[in-house]
């Protein structure tokens, strides 16, 4: 009885990764609706939020920084999960993996391409909030931009990961209530985490969005980089790398 030998593991290649990223960016260039969703929707949400609280600028200052991290995470999660699933259902992913292209190259290429868009997205949202909408930030706006970028990259990593478990674009969207909404409720945006029930506080301590919000609030309240800010930043970055690794491990060639 003959068996099929497993495909050899390919080492991560910078050239294959950048080629994958360039291909993804070329495809996105012809999809203006997706680009608008990624770049403009977070800015639009911040703009609307600022004028919803037009009579209370303090309220916008209190939650604006947190949402500056949350909105990019959500939009990158949604777009990345659907785009990756579309590659698999169309058969493109199977053809790519039949070439000298490893799963690590593919995931890293997607992360690089969407990460480039995340830089633009985070810069637009941060610039709008700080210099146009008047978000009062005690710390450096550049630190705010750094955390917003890490949050967007975390959303990209989560989107790549959950796309392996969806069989259709509709199912990919359904993962948002399961993956994003619990983090949104427990991240400290609606109530301080230390006032929650101990069980919920413990769960929130294990969710990366909690540290994204904490990091934003650290920049909002402190002039210098604090130990807590360094910790929060490293946790968000570490979670993004961990989820990207899981995404490479669970990536499927095609949808069954």
Image (cartoon, helix red, strand yellow):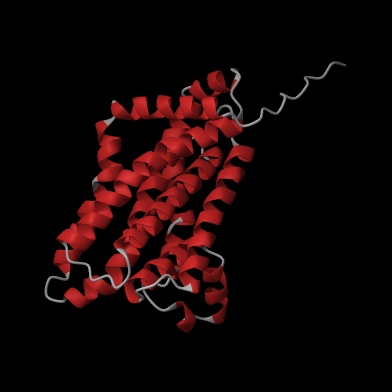
| Quadrant that contains the N terminus | top right
Q: Which residue extends farthest front?
A: 224
Q: Position of residue 230 (x, y in %)?
A: 49, 66
Q: Position of residue 221 (x, y in %)?
A: 34, 76
Asked whether, in this view, residue 69 is left or right of residue 131, the answer is right
Residue 169 in sight: no
Q: Residue at x 52, y 67 (%)?
A: 231
Q: Which one is in front, 201 or 8?
A: 8
Asked whether, in this view, residue 200 is left or right of residue 74, the answer is right
Q: Which one is in front, 207 or 166?
A: 207
Q: Which image quadrant is residue 94 in? A: top right
Q: Which one is in front, 59 or 167?
A: 59
Q: Position of residue 122 (x, y in %)?
A: 32, 51
The mark total stands at 0
Q: Which residue extends farthest bottom?
A: 195
Q: Residue at x 23, y 52 (%)?
A: 43
Q: Residue at x 56, y 81 (%)?
A: 198
Residue 62 in sight: yes
| Quadrant that contains the C terminus | top right
Is residue 54 depicted above or below 12 in this figure? below
């Amino acid at each position: 009885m003959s068996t099929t030998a497993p495909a050899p593991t390919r080492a991560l290649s910078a050239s294959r990764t950048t080629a994958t990223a360039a291909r993804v960016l070329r495809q996105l260039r012809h999809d203006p609706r997706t680009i608008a969703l990624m770049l403009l929707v977070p800015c639009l949400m911040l703009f609307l939020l600022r004028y919803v609280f037009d009579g209370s600028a303090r309220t916008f200052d209190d939650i604006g920084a947190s949402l500056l991290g949350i909105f990019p995470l959500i939009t990158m999660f949604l777009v990345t999960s659907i785009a990756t699933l579309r590659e698999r259902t169309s058969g493109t992913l199977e053809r790519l993996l039949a070439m000298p292209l490893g799963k690590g190259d593919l995931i890293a290429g997607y992360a690089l391409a969407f990460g480039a868009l995340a830089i633009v997205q985070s810069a637009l949202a941060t610039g709008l909030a700080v210099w146009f909408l008047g978000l009062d930030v005690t710390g450096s706006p550049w630190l705010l931009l750094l955390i917003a970028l890490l949050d967007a990259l975390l959303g990209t990593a989560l989107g790549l990961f959950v796309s392996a478990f969806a069989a259709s674009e509709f199912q990919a969207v359904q993962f948002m209530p399961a993956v994003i909404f619990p983090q949104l409720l427990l991240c400290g945006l609606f109530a301080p985490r230390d006032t929650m029930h101990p069980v919920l506080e413990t769960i929130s301590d294990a969710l990366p969005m909690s540290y994204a919000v904490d990091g934003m609030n650290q920049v909002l309240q402190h002039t210098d980089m604090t130990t807590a800010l360094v910790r929060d930043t490293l946790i968000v970055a570490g979670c993004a790398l961990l989820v990207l690794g899981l995404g490479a491990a669970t990536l499927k060639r095609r949808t069954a």
